[in-house]
Image (cartoon, helix red, strand yellow):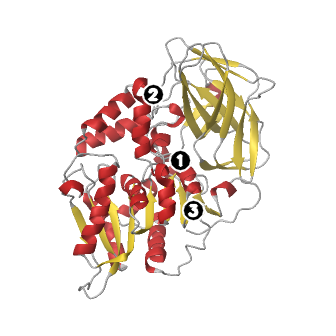
Amino acid sequence: GDGGVVLKANVSTPAGADGTRRYPVIVLPTSWAMPQVEYLAQAQKLADAGYVVVGYNSRGFWQSGGQIETAGPQDIADASKVIDWALAHTPADPQKIGMGGVSYGAGISLLTSAFDKRIKAVAALSGWGDLIGSIYSGRTQHRQAAQLLGGLGELTGRPGPELRGILKDFLGSNLAKEQDMIAWGKKRSPATYIDKINANGAAIMLGNAWGDSLFPPNQYADFYEKLTGPKRLEFRPGDHATAEGLGLLGLPNDTWNHTRQWFDHYLKGTDNGIDRAAPVLLKSRSTGAYEGYQSWRDVPSGHRKIELTGTQRIRTNIDSGANGGLVFLSSMLDQFFRLPPMASIPLLPRSVAAVWESGRYASEQRVRGTTRLHTTVTGTAESGTAIAYLYDVGPLGLGKLVSHAPFTFHGKTPGRPFGVDLELFSTAYDVPAGHRLAVVVDTVDPLYIEHNPSGARLTFSSPADDPSYVSVPVREGGQPSHKA
């Protein structure tokens, strides 16, 4: 690797490779905290299909040398060094180079595609386009996500002083270092280098889960929209890496099947139709059916507006019972059993939760895309945090979580109203006929760090000249299902 650091790897080559011909090569950096055996099952399938595959352990983890750089410049340089090594030591074709991986491997692959023009195709699964938009969305620290990454890093690798310092400042809410943390994250965000990625022109496939606890779907969709080369976006139910996780065990998996087709077309030139298929593929959390669209903007065809009328004042620092669940567990329950986090909407204490409900819908409402909230907030302190939730409410008042997102403010004048615009995490969820939608806002969620001083109050109002509302994206009319 870069600077002479040794990177441990597994190399899989096609059976019968005798040096007389060259094969497309795929480089797979490992996920955060995962050993290099992570990709062995998929590597063997790819080798059987005529690829050279190099799955290597990212620096700082397990048997590889160096310290964890968190997809920094040395990780990018490592990836190019691995490509150099593959071209020198395997029957790899220098004109047919692909990169890919899950999570950390996805991020490193996207970043490397900005700096290494040799890369012709990328499959980035459960990755990120914007690191700050992932774990600091709404200016709110994603507590459980950051603690999980930090803990796994300490357990399986060697974090350097930079990473330890960033995590300490991040989890300690050190606002004096906020700009330093943002700059650190931007340096590690593929979106920062979008012009370079587009100029190099690699064909890029992105895959993610609706409930990804580490890298929410919004930031991946935003990144996808900025790509100008061949591209594909797939969203499925689940949490971080669970949509493709079973494929790592060698079990049948749609995400890995499409990854193989992507590489087949853009590295081998196989006419398998993936370049002509609808480039945006969504799998509904409610039905499991696939839906294909020509662009992310085409996903919703209409919107349902919920007016956030009146004025509601809530106390802070108390969990109302509405929350986004637990990292990994909640979205996996949704993926496998269609059991999202739930709350009894009538029983939510109105002293600590602001609640608005729509009327009952006469027909099914297929929520598709990104829900947006606009409101006016007045705080009694200069800082504060709130979390907005969208629930599907049945006849008995039981609410199933459709989406949510946090937001935090600092430096506001106590008692002075200010506007808030918030994007909830994108999703695909069907609200049955006869149900309502409910918007709930409270101030405590185990997933996030909150910034409400003791005894603070938040007031949500709807001025006549700037009414408050939630706009819910829906898919109206017929949308054909697509086979994976």
Q: Residue at x 30, y 32 (%)?
A: 165
* Residue 176 screen position, x and y as percent: 41, 24
Q: Amino acid at mark 3?
A: Thr
Q: For residue 473, which numbered disc appears in the image?
A: none
User: Which label lies toward us, 2 or 1?
Assistant: 1
Residue 193 place in picture, x, y as percent: 47, 52
The residue nearer to you, when weighing 416 against 255, is 416
The answer to whether residue 347 is above or below residue 187 is above
- Disc 2 versus disc 1: distance between alpha carbons? 20 Å
- Residue lying at 29% horizontally and 80% vertically, measured from the top left: 14
Mark 2 vs 1: CB contact within 8 A: no
Q: Quadrant of the N terminus?
A: bottom left
Q: Nearer the viewer, mark 2 or mark 3?
A: 3
Quadrant the C terminus occupies: bottom right
Instruction: Name the kind of residue labelled 1 in the image.
Output: Gln
Question: In the rendered image, which quarter is residue 117 located in?
Answer: bottom left
Residue 5 visible in the picture: no
Question: Compared to 198, does 129 lie above or below?
Answer: above
- Return the disc, 2 or 3, that comes first in the chain's sequence: 3
- Where disc 3 sits, the SS reads loop
Proximity of marks 1 and 3: CB atoms separated by less than 8 Å: no
Q: Residue 8 vs residue 247: left or right?
A: left
Give the labeled residue for mark 3: 228
Task: Single out the residue that lies furthest toward the bottom.
Answer: 20
- Residue at 27% x, 68% y: name it: 84
Residue identifier under label 2: 449
Residue 219, label in figure: 1
Circle 3 crowding by C-alpha within 10 Å: few under 14, some 14–19, many from 20: some
Q: Secondary structure at mark 1?
A: helix
